Image (cartoon, helix red, strand yellow):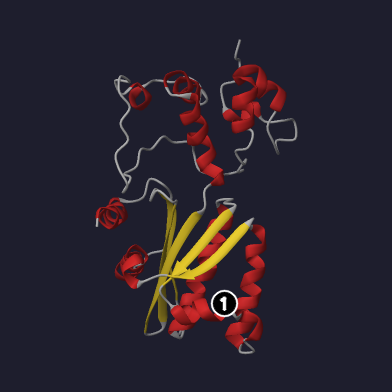
């Protein structure tokens, strides 16, 4: 009998990992290996089920009659059990594994006006699914390159807060990308800050910072403009606000 009601009931006694033996008894060894690889984020966001657009196609599963979308589940782990029953075991494995093994790409941009700087960033996986983002501002006079540096630092902190292992940053600020990748030879104040910021990336198993065409960075640019227009600072997760969702959807279609 499964007596556990909440996911936390499957944690070990110290609450810093999974009770692998109990998970194995409920789900079997195969699903145990998948579930116990999910990182435990204390004080994280509430559990939610969200279906996203995919710029590469549309997911079609025949014969399910929307039961995975509309089902009523007493326990938070029951949805995974239901998915395992109706989906191919390989599909379930891929569904769970992608949450922590995929490389997350974070695009960011910044804008300066007067004594303030605004920035926006969006995080997506290889399939174009949005995993979250952030918009914000700082009330101080910054040169454009320093504003981009601020946005880069915010992007790294955002990725760390999500416990992502493999992260790729992209920016259309070619000078910042070049200076970061040649930071050891840069003896300026900016070069010093870039070396300090690089230390933050040691948290990741893989990290890269690449230049992107401006047309490939338009969602981050639009988020930056949105932050400036609304003078607003906030994080958003997979369930992003409607205005931001429309920006992302438009980018995916085009």
Residue 217 can be seen in this image: yes
In this rendering, is residue 114 above or below 224?
below
- Left or right of 171: which side holds 184? right
Instruction: Return the x and y of residue 91 as percentages of the image width and height.
Output: 46, 30
Residue 140 can be seen in this image: no
In this rendering, is residue 234 above or below 97?
below
Q: Please report the residue visible at 38 percent of the width from the left and 51 percent of the height from the top.
A: 128
Q: Please report the residue visible at 68 percent of the width from the left and 21 percent of the height from the top.
A: 22
In this rendering, is residue 217 above or below 90?
below
Q: Residue 254 versus residue 137: which sits nearer the camera? A: 254
Residue receiving disc 1: 180
Instruction: Return the x and y of residue 136 as percentages of the image width and height.
Output: 43, 66
Q: Residue 116 versus residue 217: which sits nearer the camera? A: 217
Instruction: Return the x and y of residue 57 as percentages of the image width and height.
Output: 30, 42
Q: Please report the residue visible at 62 percent of the width from the left and 18 percent of the height from the top.
A: 26
Q: Residue 46 versus residue 193: which sits nearer the camera? A: 193
Quadrant hosting residue 25: top right
């Amino acid at each position: 009998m499964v007596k556990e009601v909440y996911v936390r009931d499957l944690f070990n006694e110290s609450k810093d990992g999974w009770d692998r033996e109990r998970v194995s008894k409920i789900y079997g060894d195969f699903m145990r290996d998948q579930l116990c690889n999910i990182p435990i984020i204390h004080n994280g966001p509430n559990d939610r089920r969200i279906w996203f657009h995919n710029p590469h196609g549309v997911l079609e599963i025949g014969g399910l009659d929307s039961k995975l979308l509309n089902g009523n589940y007493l326990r938070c782990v029951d949805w995974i059990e239901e998915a395992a029953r109706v989906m191919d075991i390989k599909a379930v494995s891929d569904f769970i594994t992608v949450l922590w093994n995929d490389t997350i790409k974070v695009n960011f941009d910044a804008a300066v006006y007067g004594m303030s700087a605004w920035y926006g960033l969006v995080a997506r996986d290889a399939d174009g699914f949005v995993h979250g983002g952030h918009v914000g501002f700082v009330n101080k006079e910054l040169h454009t390159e320093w504003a981009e540096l601020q946005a880069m630092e915010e992007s790294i902190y955002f990725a760390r807060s999500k416990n992502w292992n493999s992260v790729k940053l992209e920016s259309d600020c070619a000078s910042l990308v070049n200076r970061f990748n040649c930071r050891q030879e840069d003896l300026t104040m900016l070069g010093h800050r870039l070396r300090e910021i690089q230390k933050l990336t040691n948290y990741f198993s893989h990290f890269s910072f690449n230049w992107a065409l401006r047309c490939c960075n338009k969602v981050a640019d639009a988020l930056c403009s949105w932050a400036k227009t609304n003078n607003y600072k906030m994080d958003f997760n997979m369930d992003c606000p409607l205005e931001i969702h429309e920006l992302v959807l438009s980018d995916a279609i085009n």
